[in-house]
Image: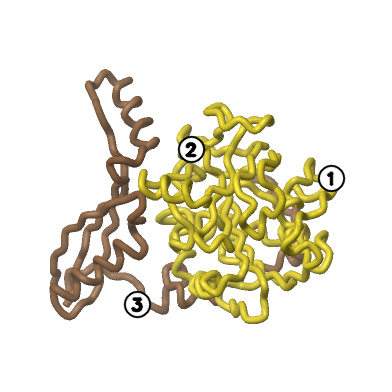
Chain colours: A brown, B yellow
Amino acid sequence: MIFVATIRVLPKSEVRDPQGEAVRGALRSLGLAVSDVRTGKEIVVTFDAADETAAREAVRVMGTELLANPVIEDYTYDLHQVKTDDAPKSAPVGEDPIFDLAGAASFEPADVDDVVYGERKQAGEG
Amino acid sequence: MKVAILRYPGTWSERDFQHALSLVPGVESDILWHEDTDLAGYDAAIVPGGFTYGDYVRAGAIAKISPATRELRRFADAGKLVLGSCNGFQILCEAGILPGALVRNRGLEFRCDWVHLRVESDATPWTVGLRGAVLRMPIAHGEGCWVANDETLADIESRGQVVFRYTDERGGATVAANPNGSLANIAGVCNEGRNVVGLMPHPERCSEALLGGTDGYRVLANLAPALAGTAPALYR
Protein backbone atom coordinates (compact mmCIF):
# COMPACT_ATOMS: atom_id res chain seq x y z
CA MET A 1 0.00 0.00 0.00
CA ILE A 2 1.27 3.43 -0.91
CA PHE A 3 1.02 6.18 1.70
CA VAL A 4 1.79 9.87 1.63
CA ALA A 5 2.78 11.46 4.93
CA THR A 6 2.90 15.24 5.24
CA ILE A 7 5.20 15.89 8.17
CA ARG A 8 5.47 19.35 9.76
CA VAL A 9 8.42 20.19 11.99
CA LEU A 10 8.37 23.22 14.31
CA PRO A 11 10.74 24.39 17.05
CA LYS A 12 9.43 23.58 20.52
CA SER A 13 7.61 26.47 22.16
CA GLU A 14 10.43 27.03 24.68
CA VAL A 15 13.11 27.14 21.96
CA ARG A 16 13.75 30.56 20.45
CA ASP A 17 13.08 30.78 16.74
CA PRO A 18 15.28 33.59 15.42
CA GLN A 19 14.01 33.06 11.88
CA GLY A 20 10.44 33.43 13.11
CA GLU A 21 11.40 36.59 14.99
CA ALA A 22 12.93 38.05 11.82
CA VAL A 23 9.80 37.17 9.83
CA ARG A 24 7.63 38.72 12.54
CA GLY A 25 9.63 41.95 12.27
CA ALA A 26 9.30 41.95 8.50
CA LEU A 27 5.54 41.33 8.62
CA ARG A 28 5.13 44.13 11.15
CA SER A 29 7.01 46.43 8.80
CA LEU A 30 4.21 45.75 6.31
CA GLY A 31 1.86 47.35 8.81
CA LEU A 32 0.34 44.10 10.05
CA ALA A 33 -0.43 43.53 13.73
CA VAL A 34 1.60 40.31 13.90
CA SER A 35 2.31 39.15 17.46
CA ASP A 36 4.16 35.89 16.91
CA VAL A 37 5.65 33.82 14.09
CA ARG A 38 7.04 30.29 14.30
CA THR A 39 8.88 28.90 11.29
CA GLY A 40 9.48 25.28 10.48
CA LYS A 41 9.37 22.97 7.55
CA GLU A 42 7.01 20.62 5.79
CA ILE A 43 8.24 17.35 4.36
CA VAL A 44 6.07 15.19 2.10
CA VAL A 45 7.09 11.53 2.04
CA THR A 46 5.65 8.88 -0.27
CA PHE A 47 6.34 5.35 0.91
CA ASP A 48 5.21 1.78 0.92
CA ALA A 49 3.85 0.04 4.02
CA ALA A 50 1.81 -3.09 4.71
CA ASP A 51 -1.05 -1.28 6.45
CA GLU A 52 -1.88 1.91 8.31
CA THR A 53 -0.33 0.71 11.57
CA ALA A 54 2.95 -0.03 9.82
CA ALA A 55 2.76 3.31 8.02
CA ARG A 56 2.31 5.21 11.29
CA GLU A 57 5.25 3.35 12.79
CA ALA A 58 7.34 4.27 9.74
CA VAL A 59 6.40 7.94 10.17
CA ARG A 60 7.34 7.76 13.84
CA VAL A 61 10.80 6.49 12.86
CA MET A 62 11.14 9.24 10.23
CA GLY A 63 10.12 11.89 12.72
CA THR A 64 12.21 10.81 15.68
CA GLU A 65 15.31 9.50 13.92
CA LEU A 66 15.84 12.16 11.29
CA LEU A 67 13.25 14.79 10.45
CA ALA A 68 12.86 16.29 13.95
CA ASN A 69 15.38 16.57 16.76
CA PRO A 70 13.38 15.84 19.93
CA VAL A 71 15.68 18.14 21.93
CA ILE A 72 14.51 21.23 20.04
CA GLU A 73 11.64 20.32 17.72
CA ASP A 74 8.18 18.74 17.64
CA TYR A 75 6.51 17.22 14.61
CA THR A 76 2.97 16.53 13.54
CA TYR A 77 1.76 14.72 10.45
CA ASP A 78 -1.14 13.87 8.20
CA LEU A 79 -1.21 10.46 6.59
CA HIS A 80 -3.26 9.23 3.71
CA GLN A 81 -3.26 6.27 1.42
CA VAL A 82 -3.05 6.80 -2.32
CA LYS A 83 -3.73 4.57 -5.28
CA THR A 84 -0.54 3.25 -6.82
CA ASP A 85 -1.29 5.14 -10.03
CA ASP A 86 -1.60 8.42 -8.15
CA ALA A 87 1.64 8.11 -6.18
CA PRO A 88 4.35 10.64 -7.08
CA LYS A 89 7.05 8.95 -9.12
CA SER A 90 10.65 8.93 -7.98
CA ALA A 91 13.68 6.75 -8.50
CA PRO A 92 13.58 3.45 -6.60
CA VAL A 93 15.80 3.20 -3.55
CA GLY A 94 19.31 2.32 -4.65
CA GLU A 95 19.17 4.21 -7.93
CA ASP A 96 19.21 7.70 -6.53
CA PRO A 97 22.77 8.70 -5.60
CA ILE A 98 21.67 11.81 -3.73
CA PHE A 99 19.12 10.39 -1.37
CA ASP A 100 20.31 6.84 -0.94
CA LEU A 101 22.80 6.74 1.91
CA ALA A 102 23.77 3.18 1.07
CA GLY A 103 24.81 4.42 -2.36
CA ALA A 104 26.99 7.16 -0.92
CA ALA A 105 30.09 5.12 -1.78
CA SER A 106 29.66 6.42 -5.32
CA PHE A 107 29.91 9.88 -3.81
CA GLU A 108 33.68 9.55 -3.24
CA PRO A 109 35.13 13.08 -2.92
CA ALA A 110 37.86 14.15 -5.29
CA ASP A 111 41.35 13.97 -3.86
CA VAL A 112 42.19 17.55 -3.04
CA ASP A 113 45.65 17.14 -4.57
CA ASP A 114 44.09 16.34 -7.94
CA VAL A 115 42.03 19.48 -8.05
CA VAL A 116 43.57 22.29 -10.06
CA TYR A 117 42.59 25.61 -8.56
CA GLY A 118 42.31 28.93 -10.30
CA GLU A 119 41.74 27.68 -13.82
CA ARG A 120 38.01 28.21 -13.97
CA LYS A 121 37.18 30.58 -16.81
CA GLN A 122 35.39 33.79 -15.98
CA ALA A 123 31.87 34.10 -17.31
CA GLY A 124 31.94 35.55 -20.80
CA GLU A 125 35.43 34.39 -21.59
CA GLY A 126 34.03 31.70 -23.84
CA MET B 1 48.71 7.37 20.02
CA LYS B 2 46.72 6.64 16.86
CA VAL B 3 44.02 9.10 15.94
CA ALA B 4 41.23 8.60 13.38
CA ILE B 5 39.91 11.71 11.66
CA LEU B 6 36.45 11.08 10.20
CA ARG B 7 35.51 12.44 6.81
CA TYR B 8 31.86 12.55 5.77
CA PRO B 9 30.56 13.98 2.48
CA GLY B 10 30.96 17.71 3.10
CA THR B 11 33.57 17.56 5.86
CA TRP B 12 36.20 20.20 5.18
CA SER B 13 38.52 20.52 8.17
CA GLU B 14 40.03 17.01 8.17
CA ARG B 15 43.35 18.04 6.60
CA ASP B 16 43.69 20.99 8.92
CA PHE B 17 43.31 18.58 11.84
CA GLN B 18 45.80 16.15 10.34
CA HIS B 19 48.31 18.96 9.94
CA ALA B 20 47.75 20.25 13.47
CA LEU B 21 48.12 16.73 14.90
CA SER B 22 51.39 16.30 12.99
CA LEU B 23 52.79 18.92 15.37
CA VAL B 24 52.01 16.79 18.44
CA PRO B 25 54.88 14.43 19.30
CA GLY B 26 53.98 10.74 19.27
CA VAL B 27 50.67 11.14 17.43
CA GLU B 28 49.84 9.43 14.16
CA SER B 29 46.60 10.21 12.38
CA ASP B 30 44.59 8.77 9.50
CA ILE B 31 41.68 10.28 7.62
CA LEU B 32 38.85 7.73 7.34
CA TRP B 33 36.00 7.90 4.83
CA HIS B 34 32.69 7.62 6.67
CA GLU B 35 31.76 4.30 5.07
CA ASP B 36 35.11 2.60 5.60
CA THR B 37 35.24 3.46 9.24
CA ASP B 38 36.65 0.72 11.41
CA LEU B 39 38.00 2.33 14.55
CA ALA B 40 39.68 -0.82 15.87
CA GLY B 41 43.28 0.02 16.70
CA TYR B 42 42.66 3.73 17.23
CA ASP B 43 42.97 5.47 20.58
CA ALA B 44 41.10 8.62 19.67
CA ALA B 45 38.74 9.93 17.00
CA ILE B 46 38.16 13.44 15.74
CA VAL B 47 34.98 14.63 14.03
CA PRO B 48 36.05 17.76 12.13
CA GLY B 49 34.06 20.74 10.92
CA GLY B 50 32.37 21.19 7.57
CA PHE B 51 28.90 21.08 6.13
CA THR B 52 28.12 17.37 6.06
CA TYR B 53 25.31 16.57 3.62
CA GLY B 54 24.90 20.29 2.97
CA ASP B 55 23.44 20.79 6.47
CA TYR B 56 20.19 19.41 5.01
CA VAL B 57 17.38 18.80 7.54
CA ARG B 58 19.59 20.19 10.35
CA ALA B 59 23.36 20.54 10.70
CA GLY B 60 24.68 17.06 11.44
CA ALA B 61 21.28 15.35 11.14
CA ILE B 62 22.05 13.14 8.15
CA ALA B 63 25.62 12.40 9.27
CA LYS B 64 24.10 11.02 12.45
CA ILE B 65 22.76 7.98 10.56
CA SER B 66 26.02 7.33 8.68
CA PRO B 67 27.94 4.09 9.43
CA ALA B 68 30.79 6.17 10.89
CA THR B 69 28.54 7.62 13.57
CA ARG B 70 27.30 4.19 14.62
CA GLU B 71 30.92 3.08 14.99
CA LEU B 72 31.73 6.32 16.81
CA ARG B 73 29.00 5.60 19.36
CA ARG B 74 30.53 2.19 20.12
CA PHE B 75 33.98 3.82 20.31
CA ALA B 76 32.72 6.49 22.73
CA ASP B 77 30.89 3.92 24.84
CA ALA B 78 34.17 2.01 25.13
CA GLY B 79 35.71 5.07 26.77
CA LYS B 80 37.97 6.06 23.87
CA LEU B 81 38.75 9.73 23.31
CA VAL B 82 36.51 11.66 20.92
CA LEU B 83 36.71 15.34 19.98
CA GLY B 84 34.14 17.06 17.74
CA SER B 85 34.66 20.58 16.49
CA CYS B 86 32.07 22.81 14.80
CA ASN B 87 30.01 20.52 12.52
CA GLY B 88 31.61 17.62 14.41
CA PHE B 89 30.07 19.00 17.63
CA GLN B 90 26.72 19.31 15.85
CA ILE B 91 26.95 15.67 14.72
CA LEU B 92 27.78 14.47 18.26
CA CYS B 93 24.77 16.35 19.66
CA GLU B 94 22.46 15.12 16.89
CA ALA B 95 23.60 11.57 17.61
CA GLY B 96 22.81 12.01 21.29
CA ILE B 97 26.42 11.30 22.25
CA LEU B 98 26.61 14.81 23.72
CA PRO B 99 23.77 16.68 25.46
CA GLY B 100 21.78 19.55 23.95
CA ALA B 101 21.46 20.76 20.39
CA LEU B 102 22.92 23.49 18.18
CA VAL B 103 20.50 25.85 16.47
CA ARG B 104 20.67 28.96 14.32
CA ASN B 105 22.76 31.75 15.80
CA ARG B 106 20.54 34.17 17.68
CA GLY B 107 21.49 37.06 15.42
CA LEU B 108 20.85 34.89 12.34
CA GLU B 109 24.28 35.77 10.99
CA PHE B 110 27.14 33.43 10.15
CA ARG B 111 29.92 34.30 12.60
CA CYS B 112 33.51 34.05 11.39
CA ASP B 113 35.66 35.54 14.11
CA TRP B 114 38.14 35.01 16.92
CA VAL B 115 36.60 34.41 20.33
CA HIS B 116 37.81 33.80 23.86
CA LEU B 117 36.88 30.68 25.79
CA ARG B 118 37.30 29.88 29.44
CA VAL B 119 38.11 26.26 30.19
CA GLU B 120 35.57 25.22 32.82
CA SER B 121 36.71 21.67 33.43
CA ASP B 122 40.05 19.91 33.39
CA ALA B 123 38.40 16.58 34.16
CA THR B 124 38.37 15.62 30.48
CA PRO B 125 41.40 14.06 28.79
CA TRP B 126 41.32 16.96 26.29
CA THR B 127 41.68 19.75 28.85
CA VAL B 128 44.12 18.41 31.44
CA GLY B 129 45.65 21.23 33.44
CA LEU B 130 43.76 23.90 31.54
CA ARG B 131 41.02 24.70 34.05
CA GLY B 132 40.53 28.45 34.26
CA ALA B 133 42.69 29.13 31.21
CA VAL B 134 41.27 31.65 28.75
CA LEU B 135 41.94 30.42 25.23
CA ARG B 136 41.63 32.37 22.00
CA MET B 137 40.24 30.40 19.05
CA PRO B 138 38.50 31.05 15.74
CA ILE B 139 34.85 30.25 15.11
CA ALA B 140 33.05 29.93 11.75
CA HIS B 141 29.43 28.85 12.04
CA GLY B 142 25.82 29.77 11.41
CA GLU B 143 24.27 27.18 13.73
CA GLY B 144 26.31 27.33 16.90
CA CYS B 145 23.75 28.42 19.47
CA TRP B 146 23.79 25.63 22.04
CA VAL B 147 20.40 24.99 23.64
CA ALA B 148 18.87 22.45 26.01
CA ASN B 149 15.93 22.36 28.36
CA ASP B 150 16.33 23.71 31.90
CA GLU B 151 16.70 20.24 33.38
CA THR B 152 19.49 19.22 31.00
CA LEU B 153 21.30 22.51 31.55
CA ALA B 154 21.10 22.16 35.33
CA ASP B 155 22.27 18.55 35.09
CA ILE B 156 25.34 19.24 32.99
CA GLU B 157 26.29 22.30 35.05
CA SER B 158 26.08 20.30 38.28
CA ARG B 159 28.01 17.37 36.83
CA GLY B 160 30.77 19.56 35.44
CA GLN B 161 30.00 18.73 31.81
CA VAL B 162 30.38 22.31 30.64
CA VAL B 163 33.94 22.35 29.29
CA PHE B 164 34.21 25.69 27.48
CA ARG B 165 32.35 28.98 27.91
CA TYR B 166 32.54 32.07 25.69
CA THR B 167 34.09 34.92 27.66
CA ASP B 168 35.85 38.20 27.15
CA GLU B 169 39.65 38.12 27.14
CA ARG B 170 39.74 38.39 30.92
CA GLY B 171 37.47 35.39 31.38
CA GLY B 172 34.20 37.18 32.05
CA ALA B 173 31.20 35.31 30.63
CA THR B 174 29.37 38.40 29.41
CA VAL B 175 26.50 38.72 26.96
CA ALA B 176 28.76 40.72 24.63
CA ALA B 177 31.30 37.88 24.57
CA ASN B 178 28.67 35.38 23.42
CA PRO B 179 28.89 35.19 19.61
CA ASN B 180 25.77 33.14 18.91
CA GLY B 181 23.35 33.30 21.84
CA SER B 182 24.33 29.96 23.37
CA LEU B 183 22.64 29.23 26.70
CA ALA B 184 24.93 30.15 29.61
CA ASN B 185 27.63 31.13 27.07
CA ILE B 186 28.31 27.44 26.49
CA ALA B 187 30.90 26.82 23.75
CA GLY B 188 31.67 23.17 24.48
CA VAL B 189 30.43 20.26 26.57
CA CYS B 190 31.43 16.70 27.38
CA ASN B 191 29.51 13.47 27.93
CA GLU B 192 28.98 11.95 31.36
CA GLY B 193 32.03 9.74 30.85
CA ARG B 194 34.07 12.88 30.01
CA ASN B 195 35.91 11.10 27.21
CA VAL B 196 33.86 12.85 24.50
CA VAL B 197 34.20 16.61 24.11
CA GLY B 198 32.55 18.85 21.53
CA LEU B 199 33.07 22.55 20.89
CA MET B 200 32.07 25.03 18.20
CA PRO B 201 35.50 26.74 17.90
CA HIS B 202 38.30 25.34 15.76
CA PRO B 203 41.41 24.22 17.73
CA GLU B 204 42.99 22.92 14.51
CA ARG B 205 43.01 26.44 13.06
CA CYS B 206 45.04 27.93 15.90
CA SER B 207 47.77 25.39 16.52
CA GLU B 208 50.80 27.27 15.24
CA ALA B 209 51.93 30.87 15.42
CA LEU B 210 51.72 31.25 11.63
CA LEU B 211 47.92 30.91 11.90
CA GLY B 212 47.61 33.68 14.45
CA GLY B 213 47.35 31.63 17.61
CA THR B 214 48.52 28.48 19.36
CA ASP B 215 45.82 27.91 21.95
CA GLY B 216 44.27 25.10 19.92
CA TYR B 217 47.51 23.22 20.35
CA ARG B 218 47.05 23.38 24.12
CA VAL B 219 43.97 21.17 23.63
CA LEU B 220 45.39 18.86 20.95
CA ALA B 221 48.69 18.45 22.81
CA ASN B 222 46.82 16.35 25.36
CA LEU B 223 47.06 13.52 22.84
CA ALA B 224 50.82 13.30 23.20
CA PRO B 225 51.51 10.00 24.98
CA ALA B 226 54.22 11.59 27.10
CA LEU B 227 51.70 14.09 28.38
CA ALA B 228 48.76 11.79 28.86
CA GLY B 229 47.36 12.39 32.31
CA THR B 230 49.64 15.32 33.04
CA ALA B 231 49.47 18.98 32.30
CA PRO B 232 50.31 19.59 28.64
CA ALA B 233 53.40 21.58 27.81
CA LEU B 234 52.63 24.94 26.28
CA TYR B 235 53.53 25.39 22.67
CA ARG B 236 54.85 28.85 21.98
Whether residues under marks 2 and 3 lie with C-beta atoms below 8 angstroms apart, the answer is no
Judge by depth and name the residue closer to the eye, B197 or A1. B197
Name the quadrant containing residue B84: bottom right
Q: Chain of mark 2?
A: B
Question: In the rendered view of the protein, which quadrant contains the N terminus of chain B?
Answer: bottom right
Left or right: A49 with respect to A99? Answer: left
Q: Which residue is mark 3?
A: A92
Q: Residues within 10 Å of mark 3 (few under 14, many from 20)?
A: few
Q: Is residue A34 visible?
A: yes
How many angstroms separate mark 1 from mark 3 (CA)?
A: 51 Å
| Amino acid residing under circle 2 | Ala
Mark toward the viewer: 2 or 1:
2
Q: Is residue B233 above or below residue B138?
A: below
Same subunit: marks 2 and 1: yes
**Residue A18 image position (x, y, % from top left):** 39, 35
Q: Nearer the viewer, mark 1 or mark 3?
A: 1
**Disc 2 secondary structure class:** helix
Question: Which residue is under mark 1?
Answer: B210
Residue extending furthest toward the top: A31
**In the rendering, at what x and y percent does residue A62 appear?**
30, 65
Q: Chain of mark 3?
A: A
Occupied quadrant, residue B169: top right
First of labels 2, 1 by sequence position: 2
In the image, what residue occupies the spot 78% across and 64% down?
B224
Identify the residue under disc 2: B184
Asked if residue B97 lies left or right of residue B79, the reply is left
Assign a secondary structure to mark 3. loop
